[in-house]
Each structure stands twice: as C-alpha cells, then as structure tokens.
Image (cartoon, helix red, strand yellow):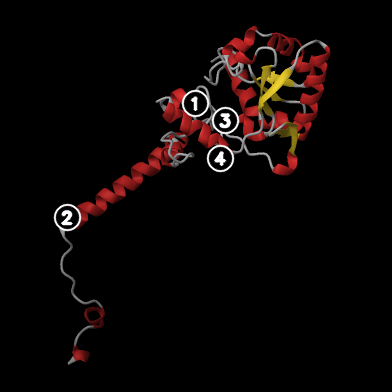
Amino acid sequence: MADDIPVAQRSQPQRPPRSPFLNRLGLLGLGVSALVVGLALLFPEPLRLWLTPPPVRGLDARTSADGRLLGHFPYEEASAAELVEVAPGQALQRDAAQALLAMQRAAVADGVQLVVLSAFRPAELQEELFFAIKSERNQSALERAQVSAPPGFSEHSTGYAVDLGDAYAPQSNLSVSFETTQAFSWLQANAARYHFILSFPEGNVQGVSYEPWHWRFEGTAAALQVFEPAHRLSRASDTGP
C-alpha cells in the first residue's frame, strides 16, 4: 500500500543517471562563463569594444578606446533650428555663420574672396560621400577615412566646420594646392581672430590627411565642448608617454 512507502521515496521519483557527456558539457559552460568574467575584470575596455557591434552599417570597423572610428571622433548632428544659410545651399550653426560672414567681409577688404565649398552635411549625405566615392575609387575603408569621415563621425555634421576655397584660384578647391593661394595665407594670418582653426594640419595625430581647406569654429563654449576630445588627443600627443 502507498502508506507503507516512506514519504521521502514517494516524493522523489527515481531518475536515470546523468550522462557523463552532459556533466562535462555543464563544466565546460561554467569554465567559459568564468573565463568571460575574468577577461571582463582584467580587460574591460577591449572586451567591450569586441562585443560592441560596428557603429556604421556596412563598415566592418569598431571604435577605439577613445571613441574614434578610423581616426575620426563621433559627432552629433546639428538641428535644423540651429542652422543659418551662409551661401546658396550651404548652412552653418548660427554662431559659426555669423563669424564666417564677418571673416569673409574682412577678407574682401584685403582683396581676398573666401568661397564656401561645403558646410553643414547631414549623416545621409556623408554616408553617400563616404561609401559611393570609396567604391568609385576602389579604396579600403581606412584609405577613404583618411580623406573623408564615416557618417556620424564628420565635423561637418556639427554645423561648425566649413570647407573654404579661393575665388581667384578655383583649381585649388579641395586640394592640397589650396595652401599656395592668397586665401590660405590670409586664413593663416587672420582666421583665429574669428575663432576658426585648421582641423587637420600636416601630421595631425588623428591620422587624417592634411586638409588646408577644412576649418572649424571654436568661438563658443558649446563649440569648444564638441571638439574637446580632439584637443585632448592633441595634448596627450604633445606631452608624450
């Protein structure tokens, strides 16, 4: 009768012995988990970067420890409400726009005409410029990144960056030869008065190709904060190990 069977035996039905293979599999799983936890404690940043998916669709590259992708820092896109037109089809963040227009007027007074070649660019346009030209020129992602930022990582998306040319030397547009123009000489001597600096001088620590035409505005606290990571990298490079 059921009452004759001890309670312990009635409440714990007999189970088949566990397979040795399953035992080993369980131990292996525990070992892998312990390894992942150990690596996370010893090397938290590399593991995070390895586990984080690539930030740009179609680009098999991950950000470095300081947030850069192929040398470029990430930037938030300026809102339409912040933008002011500085040339047909070209706009900048309001403070940058006012400074640029004042700088252009001062240049004209000195016989130099600064032309706006490119200003604010949304991520969609930057994506097209990066991938379409990369394919057209048969470039690797790293080669393309030396001359153009991936989408989401361009200074142009902030509304603070502008590409300038010389109206009297259009053949130098977006070329290193711009450094030989009167416009570039004038910018070197006067741009800082209007809070514009050269973003990518020769030998810059970001590893971006020299761009004498690419200038960014740093005349407000907000603008300085946007570009602080780039300044921090330059300071670290100046002080050395």
Which residue is denoted by mark 4 in the rendering?
124
Residue 82 or 54: which is nearer the viewer? 82
**Of residues 144 and 51, which is closer to you in this image?**
144
- Mark 3 → mark 4, Cα distance in angstroms: 17 Å
Separation (CA) of disc 1 from disc 2: 50 Å
User: Relative to 180, is 195 on the left or the right?
Assistant: right
Q: Secondary structure at mark 1?
A: helix
Three-letter residue code for mark 1 = Ala
- Residue 223: x and y in percent read 72, 30
Q: Is residue 37 left or right of residue 167?
A: left
Give coordinates of residue 102: x percent, y percent. Answer: 82, 23
**SS label for mark 2:** helix
Badge 3 is on which residue?
73
Q: Is residue 172 above or below residue 33?
A: above
SS under mark 3 = loop
- Label 1 or label 2, whichever lies nearer to me, is 1
The residue tagged 1 is 145
